[in-house]
Amino acid sequence: MAENEPGRGTRVLTSRTAIGGVAGLLGIGLIALIVMAATGFNGTTQQRLKVINCNPSETCLPRQVTHFHADFALFIDGKQFNFDQPQFVSNDDDLIAADVHIHPERYTVVHVHYTNTTWARFFQTMGFDFKDESMPGITAAQTCLAMPDGTKLCNNDKDTFKFFVNGVQVKGIAGTDIADLDRVLISYGPETPAAVQQSQVTKVSDQACIPDERCKDRIPPNEPPEQCSLSNSAACAVTGS
């Protein structure tokens, strides 16, 4: 029995060595994954993943550089809100927010430059505070839109929010990601969903395809060059963090 002790000791040592080797390989693999994530898995800075503009109350997700567009409209008591105001509009050399913004001449088209960009984030960049049922823990009774001037619009017995995406009513949009070529309506007031669909959904623009360069033939002949179009991404490229 005594002669077997060294053998047992050798087997234990071999097992520990194997475990250590596996752990080392796992550690190397983890480092490789982190490096790949930082470079977007292909070594290019254009595809790198970042976490930006993340509040403590939000879920921080990796956001990849992109460039696409969507149409939107906000109606309050039957009247369309005007976003053609200096505090809401970005220019190529003066971006209100690098990740998401609007440009002249299309004030109802949102430009998105990072993936995982929500509608709540878009409105936040312009001074709004937007919460609805598409966000974790928010109920219909808690659905509210705080305006930049301090006015707060919330669901109540008289006035309610109605949301439509591509003509289909949904419970909320604040916590959902902006999608390419979506047409989104936010309506607040006493109107029924049927009335909103008939009188307001049809007024949501369909011009996101212009900066997306899928319908360039629709650009008016005397209009200035499109800011931040798909082929002009360099003019509004996101290079910082």
Image: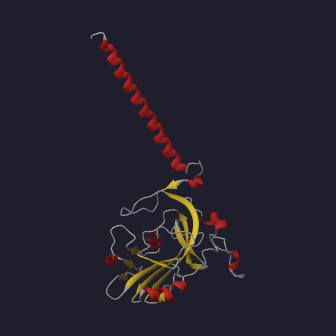
- Percent from the top left, x then y, of residue 158? 34, 89
Q: Is residue 193 left or right of residue 180?
A: left
Q: Quadrant of residue 194?
A: bottom left
Residue toward you, 225 or 19: 19
State the residue in front, 90 or 64. 64
* Residue farthest top in this picture: 3
What residue is drawn where x is 32% and y is 76%? 142
Quarter of image, res 232: bottom right
Residue at image x 47%, y 89%?
79
Examine the rendering and report whether any part of residue 241 can be seen.
no
Residue farthest front in this picture: 1
| Residue positioned most to the left | 1
The mark total stands at 0
Is residue 116 in sight in this rendering?
A: yes
Report the residue at 51% width, 79% height from top. 167
Which quadrant is the N terminus positioned in?
Answer: top left
Residue 30: x, y in percent? 46, 42
Q: Residue at x 44, y 71 (%)?
A: 120
Residue 24, image x and y in percent?
44, 33
Is residue 84 positioned above or below 28 on the image?
below
Is 13 located above or below residue 144 in the figure? above
Residue 131: x %, y % from top left:
38, 73
User: Which quadrant of the structure image shows residue 160?
Assistant: bottom left
Indicate the colouring scheme: secondary structure
Of residues 11 and 68, which is closer to you in this image?
Answer: 11
